[in-house]
Image (spheres, rainbow, N blue to C red):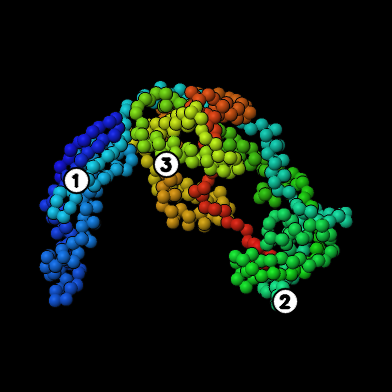
């Protein structure tokens, strides 16, 4: 192998590598010997086929495999010999090759920058500390009550409306043959109108119905309905409205607390206060982490690999486009100021990523598989009743699993730095703590270009398993 350095421009190195023809021939022969051990040809035992015949029949098919292996091996050795640390996958381009001739290819690689980590003990970080007050606990309890509304019997003779719950009995049949199929009947089923629990068209026909009323509901099952014997067919349901219920505000008492799995109101208040305290602690950490990252960013200056910067810049623009589509906004071009702002954000992210990675590597900080599994368990707990799906998602998607390692590594490095840093606590109110985060987001572009950061910092969760939809009359007439 011959290596000739063509040019070096900052972090970009370009080399020309030549693999002699005799080296390639030798590699082909060695591979054909391996292939010949299992090849069966008339008149020859496995392993006894002459090399000339193997070359004639399998030489071309083996050549591609040999060349790929040779390029991978020699490029890795060239990088290792020059003690380069690639930032991204090297670019390889074959320049010359023909049967019986040398293989010549170019190797372009962007390397990680070399820089000195600043004295981490010089970091001064203020930790805002806040505790939830009684007002916050009361408001949280009221919100919980609003989200856990009960129902009460409608005492007037009014008709049903969206948001009401009707207690119904129904018996359905397919319209073309009057057959009552399994799953098309139910007695005293509770259905909230407007919930989309039943197939399209069913719930809307019950709007205006009164308690004690009977009516025929005519619907068409979707063409892709799960039960094939009903898919795409018209049906008639004889429905009787037994009761009409309307939403009722939940009363915050011991019974309400027990419905949430607590012993009494006092226990519920304690649980809510603990939850609020955890949330405030998380916001406190976010403030500390931002101050720490600002310190690291200000303390280090080095060249950033161009391709890494472009990739991060593209990620930001893609995220902005996704946010635009979700908000139903029209596509608009970026001004020069906005373009620079997003570039600054991308540069900060790449630079901080390299700094944290270097600190972690120097101090042998790693993420164990057990920690990764705990993270998956925590993720699964966010989807009650769908834990199995979450586990299957990550078991079948190794890349998604590995994507969880990076944030875990980052948090461990941040914890390591905070242990060395000069951290002082400052008592603040919960409102003051939240305002700190808002103020950070409204800082000028010089202070990390935050107007753009506000948009790109949202978590969209597209890499998470999709939530399991409710069964479809119950979108499956069960």
Task: Work out how far the residue at label 1 is from the one at label 3, CA to CA, in angstroms.
Answer: 37 Å
Q: Secondary structure at mark 2?
A: loop
Q: Check if mark 2's residue and mark 1's residue have beta carbons within 8 Å.
A: no
Residue for badge 3: 406
- Which of 124/46 is in front? 46
What's the CA distance linking mark 2 and mark 3? Answer: 60 Å
Q: Which residue is mark 1?
A: 104
Mark drawn on residue 114: none
Relative to 52, is 294 on the left or the right? right
Looking at this view, is 113 or 276 the one in front? 113
22 lies left or right of 343: left
Q: Out of 189 and 92, give the one closest to the viewer.
A: 92
Closer to the chain start, of discs 2 and 1, is: 1
- Name the spot of residue 47 as percent of width and height, x first: 15, 68
Q: Nearer the N terminus, badge 2 or badge 3?
A: 2
Picture coordinates of residue 396 (x, y %)?
44, 56
Helix, strand or loop at mark 1: strand
Instruction: Give the vertical position of 64 relative to 265 (above or below).
Output: below
Q: Position of residue 254 (x, y in %)?
A: 73, 46
Residue at the image point whose x is 32% and y is 43% from the top: 89
Q: CA distance from mark 2 to mark 1?
A: 77 Å
Residue placed under numbered mark 2 in the picture? 178
Q: Earlier in the sequence, mark 1 or mark 3?
A: 1
Callout 3 secondary element: helix
Q: Quadrant of residue 311?
A: top left
Instruction: Tell me the crowding category of disc 2: few under 14, some 14 to 19, or many 20 or more residues within 10 angstroms, Cα based.
Output: few
Report x, y in % for residue 57: 18, 66
Q: Quadrant of residue 189?
A: bottom right
* In the depicted structure, whether residue 63 falls above or below residue 255: below
Residue extending furthest toward the right: 157
**Circle count:** 3
């Amino acid at each position: 192998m011959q290596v000739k350095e063509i040019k070096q421009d900052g972090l970009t190195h370009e080399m020309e590598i030549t693999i002699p023809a005799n080296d390639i021939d030798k590699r082909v022969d060695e591979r054909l010997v391996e292939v010949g051990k299992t090849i069966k040809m008339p008149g020859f035992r496995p392993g006894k086929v002459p090399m000339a015949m193997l070359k004639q029949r399998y030489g071309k098919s083996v050549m591609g495999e040999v060349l790929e292996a040779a390029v991978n091996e020699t490029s890795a050795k060239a990088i290792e010999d020059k003690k380069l640390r690639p930032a991204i996958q090297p670019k390889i381009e074959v320049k010359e090759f023909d049967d019986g001739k040398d293989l010549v290819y170019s190797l372009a690689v962007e390397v990680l920058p070399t820089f000195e980590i600043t004295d981490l003990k010089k970091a001064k970080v203020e930790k805002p500390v806040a505790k939830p007050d009684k007002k916050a606990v009361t408001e949280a309890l009221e919100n919980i009550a609003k989200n856990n509304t009960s129902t009460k019997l409608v005492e007037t003779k009014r008709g049903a409306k969206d948001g009401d719950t009707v207690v119904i009995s129904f018996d359905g049949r397919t319209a073309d043959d009057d057959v009552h199929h399994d799953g098309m009947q139910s007695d005293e089923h509770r259905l909230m109108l407007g919930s989309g629990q039943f197939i399209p068209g069913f719930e809307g026909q019950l709007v205006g119905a009164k308690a004690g009323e009977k009516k025929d509901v005519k619907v068409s099952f979707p063409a892709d309905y799960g039960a094939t014997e009903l898919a795409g067919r018209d049906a008639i349901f004889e429905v009787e409205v037994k009761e009409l219920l309307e939403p009722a505000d939940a009363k915050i008492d011991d019974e309400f607390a027990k419905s949430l799995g607590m012993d009494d109101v006092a226990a519920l208040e304690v649980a809510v206060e603990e939850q609020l305290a955890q949330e405030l602690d998380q916001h406190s950490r976010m403030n500390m982490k931002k101050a720490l990252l600002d310190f690291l960013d200000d303390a280090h200056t080095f060249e950033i690999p161009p391709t890494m910067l472009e990739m991060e810049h593209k990620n930001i623009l893609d995220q902005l486009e996704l946010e635009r589509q979700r908000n139903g906004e029209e596509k608009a071009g970026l001004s020069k100021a906005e373009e620079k702002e997003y570039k600054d954000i991308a540069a900060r992210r790449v630079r901080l990523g390299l700094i944290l990675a270097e600190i972690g590597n120097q101090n042998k900080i790693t993420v164990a598989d057990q920690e990764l599994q705990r993270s998956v368990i925590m993720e699964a707990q966010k989807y009650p009743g769908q834990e199995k799906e979450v586990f299957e998602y990550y078991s079948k998607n190794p890349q998604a699993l590995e994507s969880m390692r990076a944030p875990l590594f980052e948090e461990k490095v941040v914890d390591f730095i905070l242990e060395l840093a000069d951290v002082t606590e400052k008592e603040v109110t919960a409102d003051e703590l939240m305002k700190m985060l808002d103020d950070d987001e409204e800082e000028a572009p010089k202070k990390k270009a935050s107007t753009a950061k506000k948009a790109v910092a949202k978590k969209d969760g597209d890499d998470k398993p999709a939530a399991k939809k409710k069964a479809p009359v119950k979108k499956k007439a069960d």
